[in-house]
Image (tube, helix red, strand yellow):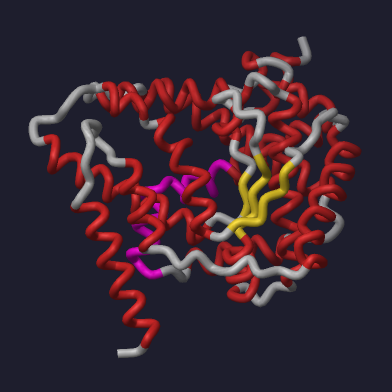
């Protein structure tokens, strides 16, 4: 058995043990989630030269300038540009997941609390592990909704490096593309200080209903339409701000997703990553129509007030949204 295989076996054992030994009084043992997710995930390396580190900051600074110019939105980016390993990303997101899932903690004990805790802990650890292996960059609005002023813009360097290699893409160009995309999200949440609380409240309402054995379809629909606007507007700004054509990168990523094995495709569906792609495409089409009929400044009015968010119907009929906001 090779040393790599031995390490994999030991890490799998550590991950399973952390889940099966989940303890506490709640339905999820979050310490065990973090331990199991990290045991199942190679952290990767961030042993970068000073020039490689500064390149991330340069990309963000130049992206901020370009996005400000094309959007007309006054916004800033976090003071901290954090280059992370996959383990860093998992640690940074466990508390966010814990807060969003808090309605489950408040729901009360299930009929078999020990069994449910192990299942819930295992499910969350798998989710964080899969995401930790695939997230490239993150500007997380849920971090802001808790009043956390020390938030950061995250770049998971090992994932960016790995995906750039798999796509046969120039690393510097690919890294810059990721930076621009995350900065467009910073512009959105800078333009709409209310947006992070709006998204989190809709998510918490939906999860609270699930904890009570119900489905709050309206909360999930509002969350979906808001995230469609978020992703679509980001695509609009990318088209306007990025200093190179990037359709080839999108095409290569889509081709790689289509070529995933059945298990990977199942996990992506369970995590809602297919939904995110639909949000990109639907939101992009909405804003392209708005800009063609008016301009970017009119599209940016979506962030003036929660009432200006498009409805599900308006996403497919942008002229209805335009008529409403331009009255």
Looking at the rendering, in which quadrant would you find the N terminus?
A: bottom left
Asked whether 24 or 197 is in front, the reply is 24
Quadrant housing residue 249: bottom right
Q: Residue at x 35, y 22 (%)?
A: 216
The residue stretch that appears in magenta: 261-279
The residue that appears at 50% across and 64% down in the rendered structure is 43
Closer to us: 25 or 71:
25
Residue in the picture at 66% in, 69% down: 47
Q: Residue furthest bottom?
A: 1
> How far across and how far down the image is residue 269, in percent?
39, 51
Q: Residue at x 72, y 70 (%)?
A: 171
Q: Is residue 259 left or right of residue 319?
A: left
On whether residue 264 falls in the magenta region, the answer is yes
- Quadrant housing residue 56: bottom right
233 or 64: nearer the viewer: 64
The answer to whether residue 266 is magenta is yes
Q: Main secondary structure of the magenta part?
A: helix
Quadrant in which the C terminus appears: top right
Give the answer, above or below, for where 185 lies relative to 195.
below
On the image, the x and y values in percent for residue 93 come to 49, 43
The residue nearer to you, when weighing 259 against 183, is 183
Where does residue 218 sit, x and y in percent of width and height? 41, 21
Left/right of residue 207 with respect to residue 283 in the rendered view: left
């Amino acid at each position: 058995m090779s040393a790599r295989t031995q390490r994999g076996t030991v890490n799998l054992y550590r991950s399973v043990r952390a889940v099966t030994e989940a303890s506490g009084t709640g339905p999820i043992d979050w310490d065990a989630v973090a331990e199991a997710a990290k045991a199942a995930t190679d952290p990767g390396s961030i042993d970068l030269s000073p020039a490689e580190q500064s390149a991330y900051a340069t990309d963000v600074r130049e992206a901020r300038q370009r996005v400000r110019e094309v959007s007309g939105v006054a916004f800033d980016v976090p003071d901290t540009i954090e280059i992370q390993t996959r383990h860093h990303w998992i640690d940074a997101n466990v508390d966010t997941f814990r807060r969003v899932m808090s309605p489950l903690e408040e729901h009360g004990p299930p009929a078999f609390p020990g069994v449910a805790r192990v299942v819930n802990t295992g499910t969350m650890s798998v989710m964080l592990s899969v995401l930790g292996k695939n997230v490239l960059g993150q500007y997380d609005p849920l971090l802001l909704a808790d009043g956390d002023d020390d938030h950061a813009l995250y770049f998971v360097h090992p994932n960016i490096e790995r995906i750039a290699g798999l796509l046969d893409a120039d690393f510097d160009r690919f890294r810059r593309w990721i930076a621009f995309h995350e900065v467009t999200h910073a512009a959105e949440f800078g333009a709409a200080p209310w947006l992070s609380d709006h998204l989190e409240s809709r998510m918490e309402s939906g999860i609270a209903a699930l904890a009570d054995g119900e489905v709050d379809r309206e909360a999930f629909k509002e969350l979906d339409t808001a995230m469609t606007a978020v992703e679509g507007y980001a695509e609009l700004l990318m088209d306007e701000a990025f200093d190179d054509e990037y359709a080839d990168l999108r095409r290569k990523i889509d081709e790689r997703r289509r070529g995933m094995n059945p298990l990977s495709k199942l996990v992506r569906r369970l995590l809602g990553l297919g939904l995110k792609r639909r949000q990109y495409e639907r939101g992009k089409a909405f804003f392209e129509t708005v800009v063609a009929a008016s301009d970017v400044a009119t599209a940016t009015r979506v962030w003036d007030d929660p009432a200006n968010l498009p409805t599900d119907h308006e996403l497919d009929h942008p002229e209805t949204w335009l008529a409403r906001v331009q009255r």
